[in-house]
Image (cartoon, helix red, strand yellow):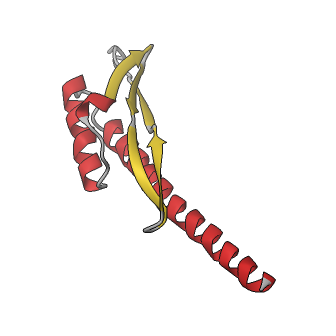
Amino acid sequence: MKTIFKVGTTIVILTMCFQAGRYYLNNFQFEDAAQQRLLFETRASDTQIVDIVMKLANEYALPLKADDVQVHMVGQDRIVDMEYTENVPLIPGVFTYPWKFTPRTSTKMLTGISGPSR
């Protein structure tokens, strides 16, 4: 009886870890894709950046709303903060946990740099 309980507990814990890992990986991939996309969109306005992030969120099937995306400058860094809550089924059909994700990306803006004078 003890062995069955231990095996059952182990299966539940492994299932929870697997489910949490899937959602965390999806968030990580989204954050990385946003970073890569914004790296090459240095001249985009704040509104265009929000549109880019929303398209990526749609591709990754994330419940992100445009109101939850903030774009601001700190020195020469353009920082994009995002926030969304995903209901993660840690034990599918039994237990769902509302996990708050806060991906963040920043890009160094190299403006005002001119080439060598001739």
Query: Quarter of the image containing the C terminus?
Result: top left
Whether residue 11 sits left or right of residue 66 in the image: it is right
Query: Quarter of the image containing the N terminus?
Result: bottom right
The residue that appears at 46% across and 42% down in the rendered structure is 101
Residue closest to the eye, 116 or 58? 58
On the image, the x and y values in percent for residue 32 come to: 43, 47
Q: How many marks?
A: 0
Residue 104 image-quadrant placement: top left
Instruction: Evaluate whether residue 64 shows in this view.
Output: yes
On the image, the x and y values in percent for residue 69 come to: 32, 30
Outermost residue to the right: 2
Residue closest to the eye, 3 or 68? 3
Whether residue 92 sits left or right of residue 56 in the image: it is right
Residue closest to the eye, 28 or 85? 85
The residue that appears at 45% across and 13% down in the rendered structure is 75
Residue 11 image-quadrant placement: bottom right
Whether residue 34 sits left or right of residue 102 in the image: it is left
**Measured along the vertical axis of the image, is residue 69 above or below residue 62?**
above
Outermost residue to the front: 1
On the image, the x and y values in percent for residue 41 come to: 27, 35
The residue that appears at 27% across and 48% down in the rendered structure is 56
Residue 44 image-quadrant placement: top left
**Measured along the vertical axis of the image, is residue 114 above or below residue 13?**
above
**Measured along the vertical axis of the image, is residue 100 above or below residue 111?**
below
The residue that appears at 39% across and 35% down in the rendered structure is 83
Instruction: Evaluate whether residue 45 shows in this view.
Output: no
Whether residue 40 sits left or right of residue 106 in the image: it is left
On the image, the x and y values in percent for residue 14 come to: 62, 70
